Image: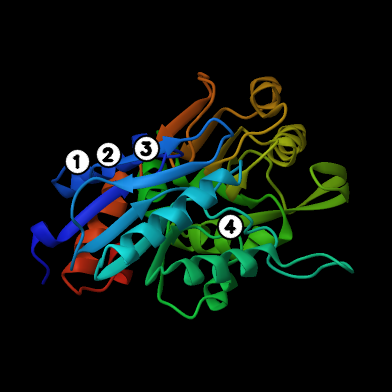
Amino acid sequence: MMSSNNVKIFSGTATRDLAEKIAEEYGQPLGNLVFERFSDGEFQPNILESVRGCAVFFVQSTFAPTQNLMELMMMIDAAKRASANYVSAVIPYFGFARQDRKDKPRVPIGAKLVANLLVAAGADKVMTMDLHAPQIQGFFDIPVDHLDSSAVFVPHIRNLNLNLDDVIFAAPDVGSSKRVRKFAARFDAEMVICDKHRKRANEIAGMQVIGDVKDKHVIVIDDIIDTASTICNAADIMINKGAKSVRAYCTHPVMSGDAYTNIEKSAIKELVVCDTIPIKQKSDKIKVMSVASLFATAFKYTTEYRSISSLFVD
């Protein structure tokens, strides 16, 4: 077991609020780190306390802009050069995860490139949550702790004032079906799938619901909500097919473009997200659940050499 004096938690600029909550849950303040900025936009992280021989956790989601990823890599490099014993890259939202394969000619596999960059920077471990494609774990030759948002979503669903016999789970696309099936199994419920066709990224050409949602409270599960067009279209279709209500649980609120407007105008009763990415606008329809306690516990289990998987047994 590591002494708390040998554990240091630092944050980049992207998800500092979440990092502060994690450190508070862990029981110690964030480490002292500043970013020196040059007039041309270049920056340099400066760790203002010793990390020699320490287990260091850097908390930074890597959503746009790519400066967030560069901050993380430079913090890792700084700690390794300062003789940190073990450096964990804590990436609540792993950017570029949607580029997990070569699905057309002459495109990169962005997720693999990011994995290579993190290893090259000196990370000894990666801790993340709800990867868009779980097989990305195989892109790394270092350990990956893959946390699961079901640890916060399942209790919230159980506490809804709903007759669980009337609840059905929905996958917004075929790729989400495995994730949604696990949720449905926990509640001994059925599931439906929304089959969509895209013309191009972020633009849906058509959608249909496979399954019966009549007189059901529908709960849509997904890892990322970006423009919200998929989930909003799915909600409208399911209401038209007789659903009593539609709620959505999405881990990472990317929320780009007209996402907030789309949510407000849609048939979605409630959108529940995690604080892996800061919310840009407040909305009565959007509820943010913190994953700070989950990450802090994962930090403790890591330093105590305990199994992380035990956090996700229902």
Tell which circle, 1 or 3, labels the residue nearer the N-terminal end: 3
Q: CA distance from mark 3 to mark 2?
A: 9 Å
Q: Nearer the viewer, residue 82 or 26?
A: 82
Image quadrant containing the N terminus: bottom left
Answer with the quarter of the image where residue 126 lies: bottom left
Where is residue 247? Give x, y as percent.
56, 36
Tell which circle, 1 or 4, labels the residue nearer the N-terminal end: 1
Q: Which residue is mark 1?
A: 24
Q: CA distance from mark 4 to mark 3?
A: 39 Å
Residue found farthest to the bottom:
141
Say if mark 1 contacts mark 4, CB within 8 Å: no
Q: Residues within 10 Å of mark 1 (few under 14, many from 20)?
A: some
Tell which circle, 3 or 2, labels the residue nearer the N-terminal end: 3
Say if mark 4 contacts mark 3, CB within 8 Å: no
Where 177 falls versus 164 (above or below)? below
Q: Secondary structure at mark 4?
A: strand
Where 291 falls versus 74 (above or below)? above
Q: CA distance from mark 2 to mark 4?
A: 36 Å
Amino acid found under the numbered disc labelled 3? Arg
For image coordinates 57% across by 71% down, the residue present is 116
Say if mark 1 contacts mark 2, CB within 8 Å: yes
Image quadrant containing the C terminus: bottom left
Q: Is residue 168 visible?
A: yes
Answer with the quarter of the image where residue 225 lies: top right
Amino acid found under the numbered disc labelled 2? Lys
Q: Which residue is mark 3?
A: 16
Q: Which residue is mark 2?
A: 21
Q: Is residue 11 visible?
A: no
Amino acid found under the numbered disc labelled 4? Glu
